[in-house]
Amino acid sequence: MKISAPAVDAVHAHVAEGYPNEICGMLVAPKGTRAVTEIRRATNANTDRPRDTYQIDAREHRAIEKECDRAGLDIVGYYHSHPDHASYASIRDTEQAWPDYYYLIVSCIGGEVKEEKVFYRTDWEARQMIEEPIEVLAG
């Protein structure tokens, strides 16, 4: 996955601010491309287990989709944090993933961002997500 340095910085800031809870948001690219240039923060709507589960409210998701459409942008993936855990695609992450979208998972240990990895699910039957290399682009 290609992602701009400012988009990575914005994700890292969101992750650190949200610690010790999981945070979430969307990876956004100009229409017709898959290179992430921006993010859109979303609210973790999971109030039962916010430290280890995230959920984006359907109404908020739709509002962000509409805003992106008006701006000529596509949602090409999602990001979330793993507070005090490594960056990996959990069983829950895999079960909830849509095929062909990027899933950026960021490890945050003690409030400090440690690493990020990107995964994608090839199809609905896939039982594991595949890790994708990250290329951070200047600007």
Image: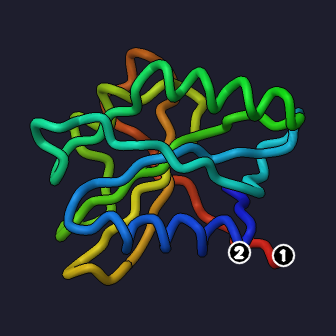
Q: Give the residue pinned by disc 1.
A: 139
Kindly identify the residue that appears in the image at 45 percent across and 20 percent down: 58
Provide residue 54's location: percent of width, then percent of height. Answer: 29, 41
Q: Is residue 66 left or right of residue 21?
A: right
Other-residue count near label 2 (Cα within 10 Å), few / some / many at <14 / 14–19 / ≥20: some
Task: Name the disc covering residue 5, or none.
Answer: 2
Quadrant of the rendered structure where residue 4 is? bottom right
Quadrant of the rendered structure where residue 129 is? top left
Provide residue 127's location: percent of width, then percent of height. Answer: 31, 28
- Location of residue 52 with respect to 137 vertically, above or below: above
- Residue with the most extreme top position: 125
Kindly identify the residue that appears in the image at 67 percent across and 37 percent down: 76
Provide residue 91's location: percent of width, then percent of height. Answer: 22, 37
Q: Secondary structure at mark 1?
A: loop
Tell which of 34 and 19 is nearer to you: 19
Tell which of 81 and 97 is nearer to you: 81
Quadrant where the image shows the C terminus: bottom right
Q: Is residue 1 left or right of residue 116?
A: right
Amino acid marked by disc 1: Gly
- Residue with the most extreme left position: 48
Other-residue count near label 1 (Cα within 10 Å), few / some / many at <14 / 14–19 / ≥20: few
Label count reads: 2
Quadrant where the image shows the N terminus: bottom right
Amino acid marked by disc 2: Ala
